[in-house]
Image (cartoon, rainbow, N blue to C red):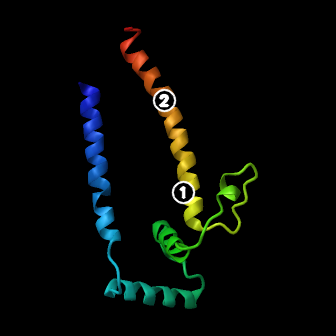
Amino acid sequence: MRIRNAAIAGATALAVAFGGTTVAGAVEGSSSAEATQTATNEGSSQNGSSNEGQSLPNKIDQDLELEGEKAADGTKIFGSSKDFSGQPVWAKVLYSLTILGGIGAVLGGVIGPVFNFINHGPSF
């Protein structure tokens, strides 16, 4: 009963956390915020790097926006010899998320049953 309640609470938290993401990402066209961002980037490029003074999510978002339509080569990313040079940023991000998700799945598959065994004992 408790595991089911925890699963429902976790699914609800994820839905609430990522529910507004699609709405925010669906905006298209030119807006005053976009014009302000362009003016800010032009001003910072005069001082040096265009990414200077930006937070990490803004830098990643800008890189993903610039290379969003660029094709990736899966054999260079997932092949036996990895070559990330020339690959778009979005492909590198998805590769790292795949590795992180795999590590999380393995740890969850090992730590969860061990924790359950420690707390509840051999009840089989």
- In what element is the residue under mark 2? helix
> In which quadrant of the rendered image does the N terminus lie?
top left
Tell me which corner region of the image, top left, top right, bottom left or bottom right, holds residue 22: bottom left
Say if mark 1 contacts mark 2, CB within 8 Å: no
Q: Where is mark 2, residue-wise?
A: 109
- Give the residue displayed 34% in from the left and 79% down from the top: 28
Residue 76: percent from left, percent from top: 70, 58
- In what element is the residue under mark 1? helix
Q: Which amino acid does label 2 sit on?
A: Gly
Residue 34: percent from left, percent from top: 38, 84
Front in this rendered view, residue 65 or 118: 65
Q: In the shown orientation, is residue 24 left or right of residue 91?
A: left
Q: In the shown orientation, is residue 113 left or right of residue 76?
A: left
Earlier-in-chain disc, 1 versus 2:
1
Q: What residue type is labelled 1?
A: Leu
Q: In the shown orientation, is residue 38 left or right of residue 91?
A: left
Tell me which corner region of the image, top left, top right, bottom left or bottom right, holds residue 94: bottom right
Tell me which corner region of the image, top left, top right, bottom left or bottom right, holds residue 71: bottom right
Callout 2 crowding tier (Cα within 10 Å): few <14, some 14–19, many ≥20: few
Q: In this view, does 25 lie above or below 49?
A: above
Front in this rendered view, residue 111 or 64: 64
Callout 1 crowding tier (Cα within 10 Å): few <14, some 14–19, many ≥20: few
Q: Where is mark 1, residue-wise?
A: 94
> In which quadrant of the rendered image does the C terminus lie?
top left
Marks 1 and 2, how far apart at CA:
22 Å
Residue 107: percent from left, percent from top: 51, 33
